[in-house]
Image: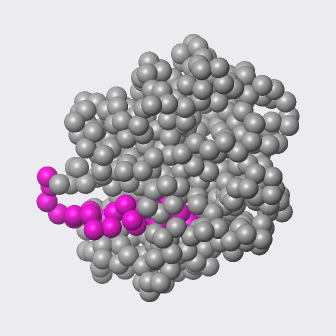
Amino acid sequence: MRFAGKTSSPVGFREALFAGLAPDGSLYRPVEKPDLSQLFASFDARTRFVDLASRTSAALLAPEIDASVARRIAERAFPFSPVLRRLDERRQLLELFHGPTCAFKDFGAQFLAASMEAFVETEDGRIQVLVATSGDTGSAVAHAFHDRTAIDVIILYPSGRVSELQEKQLTTLGGNVHALEVDGSFDDCQRLAKAAFQDPGLARRLRLTSANSINIGRLLPQAFSYAWAAAQVQQTAASGGRRGAVKPARAGAAHAEAVNAGRGPVFCVPCGNFGHLTAGVYAWRWGLPVARFIAATNANDEVPLYLENGRFVPRASLATLSNAMDVGNPSNFERLLDVFDGDAKAMATAIHGCSVSDSDTRAGMRETWERHGVLVDPHTAVGCVAAERFIATGACPDGEVIVLSTAHPGKFTETVRAATGQAPELPERLARCLQLPKQAARIGTDLGGLRGLLLERFG
Protein backbone atom coordinates (compact mmCIF):
# COMPACT_ATOMS: atom_id res chain seq x y z
CA MET A 1 0.00 0.00 0.00
CA ARG A 2 1.15 3.52 -0.81
CA PHE A 3 0.26 6.78 0.91
CA ALA A 4 -0.03 10.37 -0.29
CA GLY A 5 -0.88 13.83 0.99
CA LYS A 6 -3.52 16.04 -0.55
CA THR A 7 -1.24 17.16 -3.39
CA SER A 8 1.97 15.17 -2.81
CA SER A 9 3.22 12.10 -4.65
CA PRO A 10 2.63 8.58 -3.25
CA VAL A 11 5.26 7.07 -0.96
CA GLY A 12 5.75 3.74 0.80
CA PHE A 13 4.89 2.90 4.40
CA ARG A 14 8.37 3.54 5.77
CA GLU A 15 8.61 7.03 4.32
CA ALA A 16 5.10 7.96 5.49
CA LEU A 17 5.84 6.46 8.91
CA PHE A 18 8.91 8.58 9.58
CA ALA A 19 7.80 11.74 7.77
CA GLY A 20 4.61 12.05 9.84
CA LEU A 21 3.22 14.82 7.61
CA ALA A 22 3.26 14.84 3.82
CA PRO A 23 5.53 17.42 2.09
CA ASP A 24 2.52 19.63 1.35
CA GLY A 25 1.68 19.80 5.08
CA SER A 26 -1.37 17.57 4.81
CA LEU A 27 -1.88 14.14 6.33
CA TYR A 28 -0.90 10.94 4.57
CA ARG A 29 -3.84 8.80 3.53
CA PRO A 30 -3.99 5.46 1.66
CA VAL A 31 -3.85 5.74 -2.11
CA GLU A 32 -5.19 2.28 -2.89
CA LYS A 33 -8.51 0.79 -1.77
CA PRO A 34 -7.66 -2.85 -1.11
CA ASP A 35 -10.47 -5.37 -0.93
CA LEU A 36 -9.91 -7.28 2.32
CA SER A 37 -13.46 -8.59 2.55
CA GLN A 38 -12.36 -12.24 2.22
CA LEU A 39 -9.65 -11.79 4.84
CA PHE A 40 -12.10 -10.18 7.26
CA ALA A 41 -14.60 -12.97 6.60
CA SER A 42 -11.96 -15.55 7.54
CA PHE A 43 -11.75 -14.22 11.12
CA ASP A 44 -14.05 -15.64 13.77
CA ALA A 45 -14.43 -15.58 17.55
CA ARG A 46 -11.48 -17.95 17.94
CA THR A 47 -9.05 -15.70 16.06
CA ARG A 48 -6.50 -14.21 18.47
CA PHE A 49 -6.08 -10.47 18.19
CA VAL A 50 -2.33 -10.75 17.56
CA ASP A 51 -3.00 -13.14 14.66
CA LEU A 52 -5.64 -10.83 13.18
CA ALA A 53 -3.25 -7.87 13.48
CA SER A 54 -0.38 -9.80 11.86
CA ARG A 55 -2.42 -11.01 8.90
CA THR A 56 -4.18 -7.69 8.32
CA SER A 57 -1.00 -5.59 8.46
CA ALA A 58 0.78 -8.02 6.14
CA ALA A 59 -2.09 -7.72 3.65
CA LEU A 60 -2.06 -3.92 3.84
CA LEU A 61 1.68 -3.28 3.83
CA ALA A 62 3.03 -5.94 1.46
CA PRO A 63 5.49 -6.07 -0.20
CA GLU A 64 7.27 -3.45 1.93
CA ILE A 65 6.58 -5.48 5.06
CA ASP A 66 6.39 -9.22 4.51
CA ALA A 67 4.47 -11.73 6.59
CA SER A 68 7.42 -12.58 8.87
CA VAL A 69 8.15 -8.93 9.72
CA ALA A 70 4.44 -8.23 10.19
CA ARG A 71 4.33 -11.16 12.59
CA ARG A 72 7.29 -9.86 14.58
CA ILE A 73 5.80 -6.37 14.82
CA ALA A 74 2.42 -7.71 15.97
CA GLU A 75 3.95 -9.94 18.62
CA ARG A 76 6.04 -7.07 20.01
CA ALA A 77 3.08 -4.71 19.96
CA PHE A 78 0.17 -6.82 21.21
CA PRO A 79 0.70 -8.96 24.30
CA PHE A 80 -2.80 -7.65 25.18
CA SER A 81 -6.17 -7.82 23.42
CA PRO A 82 -9.56 -6.08 23.36
CA VAL A 83 -12.40 -7.49 25.45
CA LEU A 84 -16.05 -7.45 24.39
CA ARG A 85 -18.44 -7.02 27.34
CA ARG A 86 -22.23 -6.98 27.11
CA LEU A 87 -23.75 -3.92 28.78
CA ASP A 88 -27.43 -4.54 28.07
CA GLU A 89 -29.65 -6.09 25.43
CA ARG A 90 -28.85 -3.43 22.86
CA ARG A 91 -25.31 -2.31 23.72
CA GLN A 92 -21.92 -3.96 24.08
CA LEU A 93 -18.69 -2.37 25.28
CA LEU A 94 -15.52 -2.99 23.30
CA GLU A 95 -12.98 -2.56 26.09
CA LEU A 96 -9.78 -1.18 24.64
CA PHE A 97 -8.03 -0.36 27.92
CA HIS A 98 -6.22 -3.60 28.68
CA GLY A 99 -2.83 -2.36 27.46
CA PRO A 100 0.01 -0.88 29.54
CA THR A 101 -1.54 2.58 30.06
CA CYS A 102 -5.19 1.44 30.24
CA ALA A 103 -6.31 3.42 27.18
CA PHE A 104 -7.25 2.52 23.59
CA LYS A 105 -4.30 4.48 22.27
CA ASP A 106 -1.99 1.70 23.44
CA PHE A 107 -2.98 -0.24 20.33
CA GLY A 108 -1.82 2.40 17.87
CA ALA A 109 1.19 3.54 19.90
CA GLN A 110 2.58 0.05 20.49
CA PHE A 111 2.25 -0.87 16.81
CA LEU A 112 3.85 2.39 15.75
CA ALA A 113 6.79 1.91 18.13
CA ALA A 114 7.33 -1.69 17.06
CA SER A 115 7.17 -0.69 13.37
CA MET A 116 9.68 2.14 13.79
CA GLU A 117 11.95 -0.10 15.82
CA ALA A 118 11.86 -2.74 13.07
CA PHE A 119 13.14 -0.16 10.60
CA VAL A 120 15.71 1.68 12.76
CA GLU A 121 17.33 -1.51 14.07
CA THR A 122 19.38 -1.61 10.88
CA GLU A 123 20.10 2.14 10.63
CA ASP A 124 22.53 4.63 12.20
CA GLY A 125 21.61 7.76 14.15
CA ARG A 126 18.62 8.69 16.30
CA ILE A 127 15.10 9.84 15.53
CA GLN A 128 12.95 12.26 17.53
CA VAL A 129 9.27 11.45 17.97
CA LEU A 130 7.28 14.65 18.61
CA VAL A 131 3.69 14.26 19.75
CA ALA A 132 0.92 16.55 20.98
CA THR A 133 -1.55 15.06 23.44
CA SER A 134 -4.92 15.93 24.95
CA GLY A 135 -4.50 13.16 27.49
CA ASP A 136 -4.11 9.48 26.72
CA THR A 137 -1.97 9.77 23.58
CA GLY A 138 0.96 11.10 25.56
CA SER A 139 1.01 8.32 28.12
CA ALA A 140 0.49 5.64 25.48
CA VAL A 141 3.32 7.00 23.33
CA ALA A 142 5.61 7.50 26.31
CA HIS A 143 5.23 3.89 27.42
CA ALA A 144 5.35 2.48 23.89
CA PHE A 145 8.66 4.20 23.09
CA HIS A 146 10.29 4.18 26.51
CA ASP A 147 13.79 2.69 26.32
CA ARG A 148 13.51 1.98 22.58
CA THR A 149 16.92 1.99 20.94
CA ALA A 150 17.90 5.17 19.03
CA ILE A 151 14.53 6.91 19.59
CA ASP A 152 13.83 10.08 21.62
CA VAL A 153 10.26 11.05 22.51
CA ILE A 154 9.05 14.63 23.06
CA ILE A 155 5.49 15.06 24.35
CA LEU A 156 3.58 18.37 24.28
CA TYR A 157 0.61 18.49 26.66
CA PRO A 158 -1.68 21.37 27.76
CA SER A 159 -1.02 22.59 31.29
CA GLY A 160 -3.95 21.98 33.62
CA ARG A 161 -6.04 20.20 30.99
CA VAL A 162 -5.10 16.58 31.62
CA SER A 163 -5.94 14.50 34.67
CA GLU A 164 -3.37 14.00 37.43
CA LEU A 165 -2.98 10.36 36.47
CA GLN A 166 -2.58 11.14 32.78
CA GLU A 167 0.07 13.72 33.61
CA LYS A 168 1.91 11.30 35.88
CA GLN A 169 1.90 8.60 33.21
CA LEU A 170 3.62 10.82 30.66
CA THR A 171 5.95 12.81 32.95
CA THR A 172 7.47 10.16 35.23
CA LEU A 173 9.33 7.82 32.88
CA GLY A 174 12.39 9.94 32.14
CA GLY A 175 15.21 8.49 30.08
CA ASN A 176 14.43 8.97 26.41
CA VAL A 177 10.95 10.39 27.19
CA HIS A 178 10.82 14.21 27.47
CA ALA A 179 7.56 15.87 28.62
CA LEU A 180 6.89 19.54 27.75
CA GLU A 181 4.06 21.27 29.62
CA VAL A 182 2.55 23.92 27.32
CA ASP A 183 0.84 27.07 28.66
CA GLY A 184 -2.15 26.64 26.34
CA SER A 185 -4.76 24.25 24.97
CA PHE A 186 -4.41 21.01 23.05
CA ASP A 187 -5.01 22.98 19.86
CA ASP A 188 -1.93 25.05 20.75
CA CYS A 189 0.07 21.87 21.29
CA GLN A 190 -1.10 20.46 17.96
CA ARG A 191 -0.30 23.72 16.17
CA LEU A 192 3.21 23.74 17.67
CA ALA A 193 3.83 20.16 16.58
CA LYS A 194 2.71 20.84 13.01
CA ALA A 195 4.82 24.00 12.85
CA ALA A 196 7.89 22.12 14.08
CA PHE A 197 7.50 19.50 11.36
CA GLN A 198 7.36 22.24 8.72
CA ASP A 199 10.32 24.25 10.13
CA PRO A 200 13.28 23.91 7.70
CA GLY A 201 15.86 24.68 10.40
CA LEU A 202 14.65 21.81 12.56
CA ALA A 203 14.46 19.54 9.53
CA ARG A 204 18.15 20.09 8.83
CA ARG A 205 19.26 19.32 12.39
CA LEU A 206 16.81 16.67 13.61
CA ARG A 207 14.98 13.58 12.32
CA LEU A 208 11.52 14.56 13.53
CA THR A 209 8.56 12.23 13.19
CA SER A 210 5.13 12.06 14.78
CA ALA A 211 3.24 9.60 16.96
CA ASN A 212 -0.11 11.40 16.95
CA SER A 213 -2.99 9.96 15.00
CA ILE A 214 -1.76 12.27 12.23
CA ASN A 215 0.88 9.54 11.71
CA ILE A 216 -0.54 6.89 9.44
CA GLY A 217 1.49 4.24 11.26
CA ARG A 218 -0.46 4.87 14.44
CA LEU A 219 -3.83 5.20 12.78
CA LEU A 220 -3.82 2.03 10.66
CA PRO A 221 -3.58 -0.48 13.56
CA GLN A 222 -6.62 1.08 15.20
CA ALA A 223 -8.61 -0.55 12.42
CA PHE A 224 -7.75 -3.98 13.82
CA SER A 225 -10.06 -3.69 16.84
CA TYR A 226 -13.07 -3.09 14.57
CA ALA A 227 -12.28 -6.24 12.60
CA TRP A 228 -11.82 -8.22 15.83
CA ALA A 229 -15.14 -7.02 17.28
CA ALA A 230 -16.98 -7.66 14.01
CA ALA A 231 -15.65 -11.23 14.01
CA GLN A 232 -17.09 -11.78 17.48
CA VAL A 233 -20.46 -10.36 16.46
CA GLN A 234 -20.65 -12.27 13.19
CA GLN A 235 -19.83 -15.49 15.00
CA THR A 236 -22.71 -14.80 17.40
CA ALA A 237 -25.03 -14.10 14.47
CA ALA A 238 -24.01 -17.30 12.72
CA SER A 239 -24.87 -19.30 15.84
CA GLY A 240 -28.31 -17.75 16.14
CA GLY A 241 -27.59 -14.78 18.39
CA ARG A 242 -28.55 -11.14 17.86
CA ARG A 243 -27.56 -9.50 14.64
CA GLY A 244 -27.51 -5.88 13.52
CA ALA A 245 -30.40 -4.91 11.27
CA VAL A 246 -29.48 -1.42 10.22
CA LYS A 247 -29.52 -0.55 6.57
CA PRO A 248 -25.81 -0.62 5.60
CA ALA A 249 -24.19 2.69 4.74
CA ARG A 250 -22.73 3.27 1.29
CA ALA A 251 -18.97 3.24 0.77
CA GLY A 252 -19.17 4.77 -2.69
CA ALA A 253 -20.21 3.18 -5.96
CA ALA A 254 -16.89 1.43 -6.60
CA HIS A 255 -16.93 -0.35 -3.27
CA ALA A 256 -20.59 -0.58 -2.29
CA GLU A 257 -21.11 -4.16 -3.45
CA ALA A 258 -18.27 -5.55 -1.35
CA VAL A 259 -19.34 -3.69 1.77
CA ASN A 260 -23.07 -4.18 1.45
CA ALA A 261 -22.78 -7.92 0.81
CA GLY A 262 -23.29 -8.49 4.54
CA ARG A 263 -24.61 -6.58 7.48
CA GLY A 264 -22.40 -5.67 10.36
CA PRO A 265 -22.56 -3.91 13.68
CA VAL A 266 -23.07 -0.25 14.48
CA PHE A 267 -19.93 1.18 16.07
CA CYS A 268 -20.23 4.14 18.44
CA VAL A 269 -16.90 5.95 18.71
CA PRO A 270 -16.05 8.63 21.30
CA CYS A 271 -14.27 11.22 19.15
CA GLY A 272 -11.71 13.95 19.75
CA ASN A 273 -9.13 14.17 16.98
CA PHE A 274 -11.18 11.62 14.97
CA GLY A 275 -8.30 9.23 14.35
CA HIS A 276 -10.06 6.20 15.81
CA LEU A 277 -13.22 6.81 13.81
CA THR A 278 -11.16 7.33 10.65
CA ALA A 279 -9.47 3.96 11.22
CA GLY A 280 -12.87 2.31 11.46
CA VAL A 281 -14.02 4.01 8.28
CA TYR A 282 -10.90 2.73 6.52
CA ALA A 283 -11.66 -0.82 7.66
CA TRP A 284 -15.20 -0.43 6.34
CA ARG A 285 -13.88 0.93 3.07
CA TRP A 286 -11.63 -2.13 2.74
CA GLY A 287 -14.56 -4.50 3.05
CA LEU A 288 -15.44 -4.86 6.75
CA PRO A 289 -19.24 -5.09 7.03
CA VAL A 290 -20.36 -2.14 9.17
CA ALA A 291 -23.93 -0.89 9.28
CA ARG A 292 -23.21 2.57 10.61
CA PHE A 293 -20.77 4.63 12.67
CA ILE A 294 -21.77 7.04 15.44
CA ALA A 295 -19.39 9.96 15.99
CA ALA A 296 -19.94 10.72 19.68
CA THR A 297 -18.48 14.05 20.80
CA ASN A 298 -18.72 16.28 23.84
CA ALA A 299 -19.44 20.02 23.53
CA ASN A 300 -16.76 20.20 20.83
CA ASP A 301 -19.34 19.34 18.20
CA GLU A 302 -17.87 20.72 14.97
CA VAL A 303 -18.18 17.40 13.11
CA PRO A 304 -21.75 16.54 14.25
CA LEU A 305 -22.77 20.01 13.07
CA TYR A 306 -21.07 19.38 9.74
CA LEU A 307 -23.02 16.14 9.36
CA GLU A 308 -26.22 18.13 9.92
CA ASN A 309 -25.62 21.19 7.77
CA GLY A 310 -22.61 20.45 5.55
CA ARG A 311 -20.50 23.30 6.96
CA PHE A 312 -17.31 22.66 8.95
CA VAL A 313 -16.46 25.55 11.24
CA PRO A 314 -13.47 24.85 13.52
CA ARG A 315 -13.24 26.82 16.73
CA ALA A 316 -11.22 27.01 19.92
CA SER A 317 -11.66 23.86 21.97
CA LEU A 318 -13.94 23.86 25.01
CA ALA A 319 -12.87 22.22 28.27
CA THR A 320 -15.13 19.32 29.33
CA LEU A 321 -15.22 16.29 31.63
CA SER A 322 -14.09 14.10 28.72
CA ASN A 323 -10.89 16.08 28.33
CA ALA A 324 -9.13 13.79 25.85
CA MET A 325 -11.91 14.68 23.38
CA ASP A 326 -11.50 18.45 23.79
CA VAL A 327 -10.49 19.20 20.20
CA GLY A 328 -11.93 22.14 18.28
CA ASN A 329 -10.22 21.46 14.95
CA PRO A 330 -9.68 17.70 14.57
CA SER A 331 -6.78 16.89 12.26
CA ASN A 332 -8.23 13.67 10.93
CA PHE A 333 -11.30 15.40 9.54
CA GLU A 334 -9.34 15.98 6.33
CA ARG A 335 -8.89 12.22 5.98
CA LEU A 336 -12.63 11.69 6.40
CA LEU A 337 -13.32 14.34 3.77
CA ASP A 338 -10.96 12.48 1.44
CA VAL A 339 -12.80 9.17 1.95
CA PHE A 340 -16.13 10.77 1.01
CA ASP A 341 -14.74 13.08 -1.70
CA GLY A 342 -15.85 16.12 0.29
CA ASP A 343 -19.50 15.05 0.07
CA ALA A 344 -21.20 15.87 3.39
CA LYS A 345 -24.34 13.91 2.51
CA ALA A 346 -22.33 10.78 1.72
CA MET A 347 -20.48 11.11 5.02
CA ALA A 348 -23.75 11.58 6.90
CA THR A 349 -25.07 8.38 5.33
CA ALA A 350 -22.25 6.42 6.92
CA ILE A 351 -21.71 8.46 10.10
CA HIS A 352 -24.33 9.68 12.56
CA GLY A 353 -23.17 12.58 14.74
CA CYS A 354 -24.14 13.08 18.37
CA SER A 355 -22.96 15.67 20.91
CA VAL A 356 -23.25 14.90 24.63
CA SER A 357 -23.13 17.58 27.35
CA ASP A 358 -21.20 17.28 30.60
CA SER A 359 -24.43 16.91 32.57
CA ASP A 360 -25.55 14.05 30.34
CA THR A 361 -22.07 12.52 30.60
CA ARG A 362 -22.39 12.50 34.40
CA ALA A 363 -25.87 11.01 34.11
CA GLY A 364 -24.54 8.37 31.73
CA MET A 365 -21.82 7.33 34.18
CA ARG A 366 -24.35 7.18 37.01
CA GLU A 367 -26.98 5.23 35.06
CA THR A 368 -24.44 2.74 33.71
CA TRP A 369 -23.38 2.00 37.27
CA GLU A 370 -26.86 1.91 38.82
CA ARG A 371 -28.52 -0.09 36.04
CA HIS A 372 -25.71 -2.42 35.05
CA GLY A 373 -23.12 -2.34 37.83
CA VAL A 374 -20.44 -1.14 35.39
CA LEU A 375 -18.20 1.86 35.98
CA VAL A 376 -17.13 3.73 32.84
CA ASP A 377 -14.84 6.69 32.29
CA PRO A 378 -16.35 9.97 30.99
CA HIS A 379 -15.26 9.34 27.39
CA THR A 380 -16.91 5.93 27.30
CA ALA A 381 -19.96 7.49 28.97
CA VAL A 382 -20.26 9.91 26.04
CA GLY A 383 -20.36 6.86 23.75
CA CYS A 384 -22.91 5.05 25.92
CA VAL A 385 -25.26 8.05 25.91
CA ALA A 386 -24.86 8.56 22.15
CA ALA A 387 -25.56 4.87 21.51
CA GLU A 388 -28.70 4.98 23.64
CA ARG A 389 -29.95 8.04 21.78
CA PHE A 390 -29.26 6.40 18.42
CA ILE A 391 -31.18 3.28 19.45
CA ALA A 392 -34.08 5.48 20.59
CA THR A 393 -34.36 6.96 17.09
CA GLY A 394 -35.44 3.55 15.79
CA ALA A 395 -32.60 3.50 13.27
CA CYS A 396 -31.61 -0.02 14.37
CA PRO A 397 -34.92 -1.65 15.40
CA ASP A 398 -33.50 -5.17 15.74
CA GLY A 399 -29.80 -4.52 16.11
CA GLU A 400 -27.31 -3.46 18.72
CA VAL A 401 -24.49 -0.98 19.06
CA ILE A 402 -20.87 -1.65 19.99
CA VAL A 403 -19.54 1.25 22.07
CA LEU A 404 -15.78 1.69 22.04
CA SER A 405 -14.73 1.87 25.69
CA THR A 406 -11.64 3.99 25.44
CA ALA A 407 -10.13 4.16 28.93
CA HIS A 408 -10.20 2.43 32.29
CA PRO A 409 -12.42 4.35 34.75
CA GLY A 410 -9.52 4.39 37.21
CA LYS A 411 -7.82 7.00 35.02
CA PHE A 412 -10.59 9.42 36.02
CA THR A 413 -11.21 8.41 39.62
CA GLU A 414 -12.51 11.75 40.91
CA THR A 415 -14.85 12.30 37.97
CA VAL A 416 -16.25 8.78 38.24
CA ARG A 417 -16.64 8.99 42.02
CA ALA A 418 -18.44 12.34 41.78
CA ALA A 419 -20.90 10.94 39.24
CA THR A 420 -21.53 7.51 40.76
CA GLY A 421 -20.49 7.62 44.41
CA GLN A 422 -18.12 4.76 43.66
CA ALA A 423 -14.34 4.88 43.37
CA PRO A 424 -13.05 2.56 40.64
CA GLU A 425 -10.32 0.15 41.61
CA LEU A 426 -7.00 1.38 40.30
CA PRO A 427 -4.94 -1.19 38.37
CA GLU A 428 -1.50 -1.65 39.89
CA ARG A 429 0.24 -0.31 36.78
CA LEU A 430 -1.67 2.96 37.21
CA ALA A 431 -1.23 3.23 40.97
CA ARG A 432 2.54 2.79 40.67
CA CYS A 433 3.15 5.91 38.59
CA LEU A 434 1.31 8.16 41.06
CA GLN A 435 4.19 7.69 43.49
CA LEU A 436 6.84 8.86 41.01
CA PRO A 437 8.14 12.46 40.68
CA LYS A 438 7.02 14.62 37.77
CA GLN A 439 9.69 15.46 35.18
CA ALA A 440 8.54 18.15 32.74
CA ALA A 441 9.80 21.43 31.24
CA ARG A 442 7.34 24.32 30.89
CA ILE A 443 7.11 26.21 27.58
CA GLY A 444 4.88 28.82 25.96
CA THR A 445 2.83 28.58 22.78
CA ASP A 446 5.37 30.15 20.40
CA LEU A 447 7.43 28.00 18.05
CA GLY A 448 10.63 29.82 19.00
CA GLY A 449 10.61 28.40 22.51
CA LEU A 450 10.00 24.86 21.29
CA ARG A 451 12.62 25.20 18.54
CA GLY A 452 15.27 26.38 20.97
CA LEU A 453 14.61 23.57 23.42
CA LEU A 454 14.68 20.89 20.72
CA LEU A 455 17.95 22.13 19.24
CA GLU A 456 19.54 22.43 22.68
CA ARG A 457 18.64 18.87 23.70
CA PHE A 458 18.83 16.99 20.40
CA GLY A 459 20.57 19.16 17.80
Quadrant holding the N terminus: top left
**Is residue 336 among what the camera can see?**
yes
Q: Is 37 or 196 nearer to us in this picture?
A: 37
**Residue drawn 46% across the image and 69% down it:** 429
Residues in magenta? 122-151
37 in relation to 74, above or below = above
Q: Is 105 or 80 nearer to us in this picture?
A: 80
Residue 5's x, y, as percent?
Answer: 43, 41
| Residue 140 forms part of the magenta stretch | yes
Decide if residue 251 is on the left or right side of residue 7: right
Residue 309's x, y, as percent?
Answer: 80, 39
249 in relation to 420, above or below = above
Quadrant holding the C terminus: bottom left
Decide if residue 352 is on the left or right side of residue 333: right
**Residue drawn 43% across the image and 21% down it:** 42
Residue 44's x, y, as percent?
Answer: 48, 27
Rendered image quadrant of residue 216: top left
